[in-house]
Image: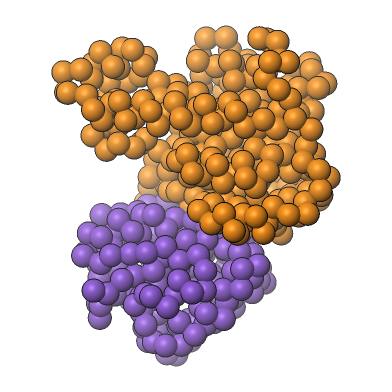
Amino acid sequence: MEKSSFATKVGLAAMLRGGVIMDVVDVEQARIAEEAGAAAVMALERVPAQIRKEGGVARASDPAMIQAIQAAVSIPVMAKCRIGHFMEARILEALAVDFVDESEVLTPADGEFHIDKHAFAVPFVCGCRDLGEALRRVGEGAALLRTKGEAGTGNIVEGVRHLRAVRAEIRRLQACDPEQLMTEAKRLGAPYDLVCRVAETGALPVPNFAAGGIATPADAALCMALGAEAVFVGSGIFLSAEPSRRARAIVDATTYWKDPRKLAEVSGGLGAAMPGLEMGTLAEGERMAARGW
Amino acid sequence: MACVGLLALQGGFAPHALALREIGLPTREVREARDLDAIDGLVLPGGESTAQLRLIERHQIAEALESFVASGRPVLATCAGLVLAARQVKPVQKSFGWLDLDVERNAYGRQLDSFEDLADGDDLPLVFIRAPRISAVGKGVAVLARWRGEPVLVRAGAVTGAAFHPELTQDRRVHQLAFAGL
């Protein structure tokens, strides 16, 4: 018997497809998420929009809070650690969370290196802005990717940019002759073997979900249409006027993204979405997506 | 030509499409009751059974699923799909009772306990991901494979159930068996 093989890690990612992973800060929110049909929850102390507003150093969550959420729901529970903070990751692994998100939403702990994720039994999800970043994370052992988007803004523009960038670069690799691939690997800053694999299969080696800025059912459907295989919703649900209804609507939209009539039906009467932020109002240092490399 | 539907509400339906294509069966995704009219077999894939149930309820698909299974057309239920098809589920949640057996959700543990192995006395590869355990089977249910003595692959009438994920391996015997008549 082989426990926690890479196949079981990517396998769990594959089972989350077509689903919504919701940020929750307490047991009550976790129950609302599960009841709405979330495929998993992300347990954290503050959602990204709150972190953005309050500032300071954002760290991994209190283990007691994560355990309370694990006890309250039957769906997978994920939790975030800081980029490069392998001890926070070890603690989350000891708690037996189902996925660790090495996340730019928290304050990075290492200015140079991401975690060696091959060294862990727990699977990791990591953010990416383009194909090079995606393949660097897979090279380090990530079993799932997500776009970085721009967390806590309720603005989908960066998530769309990252989904499109990954797609365009995959197409470009597919059109390359074999002798071009080493130069492409150099340009992308990505492992050569993974570049060759993407060129051959036309797909990433692990699933890629959307994250960062999803606030409406239409946002979720847009991400699915751009090739995301599932969506993470951070601040968008529990900072909206009616979290339970919005959670259900985003779950429905992620399943029925091809059906505009259904989308119109589920999008109605949800109350106010979370307040949004325009990218131009963010100072360079306020961009979470720029953390990590 | 026969076509197999994949219940595509949430979960791992895409790998089933690849597995079925390998054995020469075309597939189509099923998201609404009317999609069930045009298919000859059905896969209930893995994923999160609670999420799948909420979507079945909110979009009124239960009745159409019931009559599809009652029609005797072949069904393959894997992991979360097996939870939906069971007679009784622990901890208690709604299920359809298409297979006369009891399951315990996530009984093999959290993700850290997910594993790969071979079936007892066989070379059938098994991938278990936060898998349900089949804790009791009724008289009319044939046990086709076991792991450490416990049933993991079962069949009753036209319904085949697997606690593991045959679609995530290269072995196509489970899909061939489930849809042998098509």
- In this rendering, would A18 be left or right of B168? right
Q: Is residue B109 above or below residue A189?
A: below
Residue A87, position as x, y percentages in the image: 60, 24
Q: Is residue A90 above or below residue A191?
A: below
Residue A220, position as x, y percentages in the image: 59, 44
- Residue B69 visible to an observer of this rendering: yes
- Residue B117 visible to an observer of this rendering: no
Image point 78% across, 16% down: which residue? A56
Looking at the rendering, which quadrant does residue B165 occupy? bottom left
Colour purple, chain: B
Image point 63% across, 25% down: which residue? A150
What is the count of numbered marks? 0
Residue A129, position as x, y percentages in the image: 50, 23
Colour orange, chain: A
Looking at the rendering, which quadrant does residue B168 occupy? bottom left
In the current view of this chain or complex, which residue is farthest to the bottom?
B139
The one nearer the camera, A283 or A10, is: A283
Residue B53, position as x, y percentages in the image: 60, 67
Q: How is the image coloured?
A: by chain
- In this rendering, would A73 be left or right of B180? right
Image point 42% across, 58% down: which residue? B13
The one nearer the camera, B7 or B126, is: B7
- In this rendering, would A157 be left or right of B98? right
